Image (cartoon, rainbow, N blue to C red):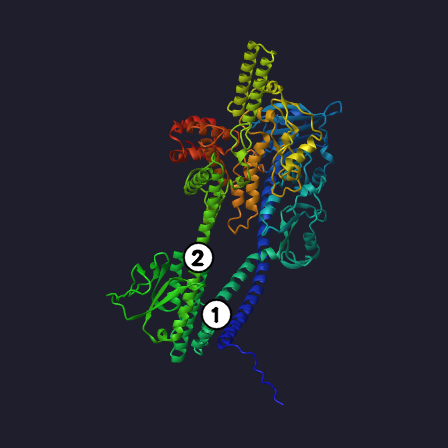
Amino acid sequence: MHHPVRFPRQFRIRVHIAVLTMACMGLVAILLIGLGWAATTQRLVLDAGQRAARDTTLLGQQIRLQLTPAQGALRHIGAGRLPLASDEASRLQALEGLIGELRASPLEAAVYIAYPNGDFVLARPLNLADVRESVAAPDGAEFLVQTITQQPDGRRLGRFRFLDGGGNLQEVQDRADYQYDPRTRPWYGVARQHPEQAQLTQPYRFATTQRLGVTLSKQATAADAVVGIDVAFDDLEQLLLALRATPGTRLALLHISGQVMAATVDLNSVGGDTQPMLSAINEPQLQHLRDVSKDAGMPQLIEIDGQRWVGLHTQIDIGLGDSLDLLQMLPFDELAADARRRALYYIGMAVALALLLLPLGWAAGKAIGRSINLLRERSLRIARFDFTGEPLPPSRVSEVGELSQAMQHMGGTIEAFLGLTESLATEPEVERMLQLVLEQLTQATQSEAAAVYLWDAQSACMQYCAKAGTIATPLPERFTYPPLPAVHASDSPLHMVNRLDLELRGRQGGLQGLLVLEFKDDVAHKDAAFQRFARRLSGMLAVAIETRQLLESQRRLFDAIIQLMADAIDAKSPYTGGHCERVPQMAIELADRLHATCDGPYANFRMSENERYAFHLGAWLHDCGKVTSPEHIVDKATKLEVIRNRIHEVRLRFEILWRDAELAAVRGELDSKQLSTRQQQLQDDFAFVASCNLGGEFLSDESIARLRSIGVQGWQRHFDDRLGLSTAELRQLDALRPETPPLPAMEALLADLPEHRVPWGDDRPAVEAGDPRNKFGFDMKLPPYQQNLGELHNLSIRRGTLTEEDRFKINDHMVQTYIMLKGLPWPTGLEQVPELAATHHERLDGKGYPRRIPGERLGVLDRVMAICDVFEALTAADRPYKPPKTLSETLRIMALMCKEQHLDAELFRYFLRTRLWEDFASRFMKPEQHDAVDLKALEALLPPQPVAECDACL
């Protein structure tokens, strides 16, 4: 039984050499860094010990600097006159010694003398704000002298004397609350017990100022009195903070009694009159150091709760037989931060050095199979769909060199083929697409040059379109095909080339053009495989040309259909002819000018090609919904007009009344004068009704009342009004008037009959905001009836010729426009056509129709359509219900519409400044409409312009 041979896992030689080199360098780097880190740790601990010794010396010098002058002052004052003074007056005369001492030693907080009978004299400087505040010092006072003197009657009198900088008395205050017996203080007792040398108290907070310090006291040599000096250690805490080696360092200065004189924490938060003990300040690291430290002055590496610290416990000799303990705990991580950064730096250097040396190890294996490996890499890149790459270096092995050239050629051909395919698929313009394709085609086929000629079926000619490279045997720019014209090689010093002419035919076999390829006269291009490859590529090119031309023809057809629809809408009504053509022309021109502007508020407005085409379609389709608008409403020139002008029916009724008056005169019911009066009244009444029918002037309440009074006149109907009606009309009349009135019936001259009011029924449109069928967001007010043909109702229209029902029917064209266009399957990039076509009747204040869109949701192109639609409507000379406006009237009305938030004021300013209205007027308006326009007056009517856009003003 044969077992398959198992090969060990294989690696390239360069990998072996590189890995071995990197491994050796990594091992050396690890050893060096580890030894360096151990030495660095030891050095950090030693450095911490040396720093602690320096800190101890510095702190001791600072404390002795404050205590040494005070000892000399004790001896000087104790040997002076002040201890001998027995009453207050003599003591005050000897105060200069105390004041002079305070001037000489600004670190001393107070100097005082206590007498055996309890008298007390103290002098303190007032150079600190909190001291001045605590004693309510007056302005200008520099020193305070406090005295307690026993009076003959046994009372103890306390006084405050405030002195200026020269020692002159400023103010004296008797202080009944100042009761102090110095004999009870520790400094007094210890000085009496040891009169031979100065004594130092434990640290404490001074009662008056709460300053940290100690008291030096000594028995006076001249008399039985004790001299004391308060020395403040205000700056000990700041000094400790300055001594921290790292931000996390903990320090504490302890008195021999165990009290904390200063620390890197706030001791005031602990509370109490005396200095706290170490255990009370919540510093467990320092407490641990004090408990475990044995060798004072030697650094110790201590681990607490998983964190390493360097602890130092040193003693400070301050003289006077006492010493202080300085505890320091330094976080090892912070001490080693710089060292760690240096170690990372060295590691980086080692890695960088290894990377720099890696090519040496890599180069050691290059000698074996370098060319084959390059070929392998190129083949793997091609397998991974990466067809690019630099040419492979030459090889001494001929087979490898040939294979390298073949691989290079294959990769370049595939890459060119992919680029050719991408250009065929993505470039929309035929000329640009052909230029790109030819450049890539010459690369894919290793040709010298290529040219494309497109077929013009109407003239049966080939027309030059694009080329790549220099054609050695050029064809004419235009020639009849077939056959090919005779050509001659150019005189340029080019080597011999061959030419291949390939017809470009589409899917249906139709001729699309001609591809001309020129290539070297070599073996590869003579092979039949090359011609098959070239023909396949030419087939792709032919299909791409056919597709582009088909798309272009479809687009032209689409545009023509849209224009045909616009022309049909205009042709439907002779009174609005040209509106659907003039508005898009003007809107597209205004949008193009906005797109081209480089300054002002529209400097950033730009349209892509798709956006411009969408706007082009929206502008041409902006009134496509008018195909559903009834002509008799769109063209309604008079109030009584439906399919025809019903004023003729009303006139016939007046004729009947005229005949009735004549018959009454024949019967003797009216004399000639009464007949003449009656006939004149009928003439006047009909003339009034006819004038009201025109809708030219505003109809007042008096006119409406007169219409109603005229309308109540009666005339007799002798014929059945149900005869000749359609089935729907008869059904409606039966529902409203089931019983037929007997004939002859009296009828009103002008009436609003029930059958005049056509209800909505099942035709009620879904345009109200609360209608659940309303899925397009319409927000329109629906009139109570679908149509109201009432004669008085129509004649009573105050302005114009349209009733509320008529106005809704006309406005409904926007609803129909939106619904019709929303139902079309618009391609990508043209989805906004329905919005652009159906928003030109919206307003900036949100009161437009059909959807009451607020101004902030209206884009620039929506506002362009609104301005152009209003301008054309006001200047149109083909409206039956109004005369055309002049230029000045039109622009003034539009300015007022801007003020009322109907139109965009800023866009209207731009419209005025570009004078597009002037170009439009010269093309479409009648000469009598051209009049002078005052731009400044129009600007005054517009709302104020924002400050940031003042440079766009007229």
Q: CA distance from mark 2 to mark 1?
A: 34 Å
Q: Position of residue 346 (x, y in %)?
A: 51, 63
Left or right of 493: which side holds 760?
Answer: right
Q: Position of residue 292 (x, y in %)?
A: 70, 57
Task: Answer yes or no: is residue 114 visible.
Answer: no
Marks 2 & 1, CB-CB < 8 Å contact: no
Q: Which mark is residue 548?
A: 2
Query: Which of these two is toward me, 513 or 26?
Result: 513
Q: Amino acid at mark 1?
A: Arg
* Residue 912 in which image quadrant: top left
Q: Amino acid at mark 2?
A: Arg
Secondary structure under badge 2? helix
Query: Which of these two is toward me, 192 or 828?
Result: 828
Q: Which residue is mark 1?
A: 381
Residue that lies at the very extreme toward the left in this rendered image? 491
Q: Position of residue 618 (x, y in %)?
A: 50, 43
Q: Is residue 865 above or below residue 641?
A: below
Task: Answer yes or no: is residue 16 visible.
Answer: yes
Secondary structure under badge 1? helix
Left or right of 513: which side holds 43?
Answer: right
Q: Is residue 572 above or below residue 385?
A: above
Q: Is residue 77 above or below residue 744?
A: below
